[in-house]
Image (cartoon, grey):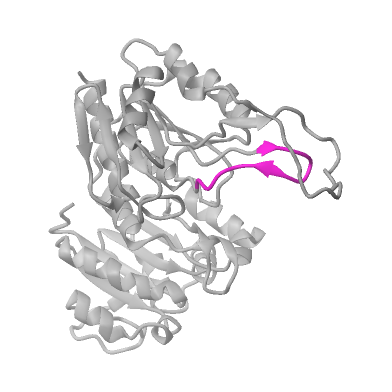
Amino acid sequence: MKLTGKTVVLGITGGIAAYKACELASRLRKAGAETYVIMTKNACEFVAPLSFETLTNHPVVTDTFARPETWEVEHVALAKKADIFVIAPATANIMAKMACGIADDMLSTTVLATKAPVLVAPAMNTGMWDNIATKANVETLKKRGVHFVGPDGGYLACGDSGAGRMSEPEAIFDAICGILCPCQDMAGLNVLVTAGPTRESLDPVRYITNHSSGKMGYAIAQAAKRRGAHVTLLSGPVQLTAPEGVEVVDVLSTQDLYDRMMERCESQHIIIQAAAPADFTPVTFAEEKIKKDGDGIMTIALKETKDVAKAVGERKQMGQVLVGFAAETEKVTEHAKAKLKKKNLDMIVANDVTRPGAGFNVDTNIVTFITEEGMEDMPRLSKADVAEMLLDRALKLYRK
């Protein structure tokens, strides 16, 4: 994506994720964007301003009262220059200031003065992100038109695990491009995406599940929304923030996924099933927690769950495009081709989850796009890039 002629003001606040902003600034510069950086005092404790000055070829602004190189009111000048104002990482503190209209440093003053679209990439401890005050501030900012990307879930610098990690620079860059150079080639289309695992309960405490993180499905949903589609996301239990503007329907078990899908599948133009529903569920559910009986062995009787993709294929509408996923560990293309036919799919995305960079809980994928016409092997790519390529091919099939 080329951003030549665009001006990005990048605000950086005090968090460990500030180092990731270096890569974001580099991407913006390589894409041709004029990039100006504003750092809070605390941000300078994590990354030196010189790093960003080298990457952007512009002086970094840190002090509201510093004498500018040219005679202009700095915060007003940068606010007017911006085609987009990005804050990454964005702490709970800066979001609280923005929600309340507080302008007590260069960053909060400039973002208050700008009329450009604002994109925020939150980064903080899970407890701070989940705090009711933070949630209220986020909702306030969204109502005012502020865009959000992330945060993601995972292991945090503080040692906690959960939502709060700043989105990767590539995802933030894609969000910037989506705002500055929106492609609306899916406008008017209803797109349904499934994502994440399902859980099959054994008793009130335990359940059977898998390692799916939902990242691939969420990337697809976000990309489809950015391209103008009306997107419904059927999501299993994941530690991801819902993409902005996407209708999210939470599901827990494979039966839940089946029921919600049957309610919606016939009204969709494109259905992309990236979820990893369980293939088996316990025959019986124990009303009380199952206890050890002392013999060291426990046998659980399982039965097959409903085949959601096959059921959708049996109800396929005229002109509808169905895309499936095949996460395999051996004979990948052979098994994927069999699923393509059995489930009445137009395309299947196959990947070997044992390959480094292609399995669960990572931000990259190595896939093969398979249709009746042939196969396309892709190198290791970000899941955001895979999502765009998938949508390109799905849209081409829809327009045939």
Residue at image coords 14%, 62%: 32
Please tell me in which quadrant of the rendered image residue 12 appears: bottom left
Q: Is residue 228 visible?
A: no
Residue 201, above or below 258: below
Q: Position of residue 94 (x, y in %)?
A: 49, 70
Q: Is residue 129 left or right of residue 18?
A: right
Q: Specify the farthest residue to the top.
A: 318
> Does 306 sit left or right of 221 as displayed?
right
Horizontal and vertical percent position of residue 178: 29, 48
**Is residue 8 shown left or right of residue 307?**
left
Q: How many marks?
A: 0
Image quarter in which the C terminus is found: top left
Residue at the outermost front position: 295
Q: For residue 258, which quarter of the picture? A: top right
Query: What is the magenta range?
Result: 200-212
Q: Is residue 159 above or below residue 191?
A: below
Tell me if I can see residue 239 in this picture: yes
- Frontmost residue, 178 versus 352: 352
Residue 40: horizontal and vertical position, in percent? 41, 80
Between residue 387 and residue 69, name the one nearer to us. 387
Residue at the image position 56 percent from the left and 59 percent from the top? 137
61 inside magenta stretch = no
Residue 205 falls within the magenta-colored stretch: yes
Above or below, 162 relative to 351: below
**Could you tell me which residue is drawn at 33 percent across and 62 percent down?**
169
- Nearest the camera: 269 or 43? 269
**Residue 8: percent from left, percent from top:** 25, 64
- Closer to the camera, 299 or 353? 299
Main SS class of the magenta portion in the image: loop
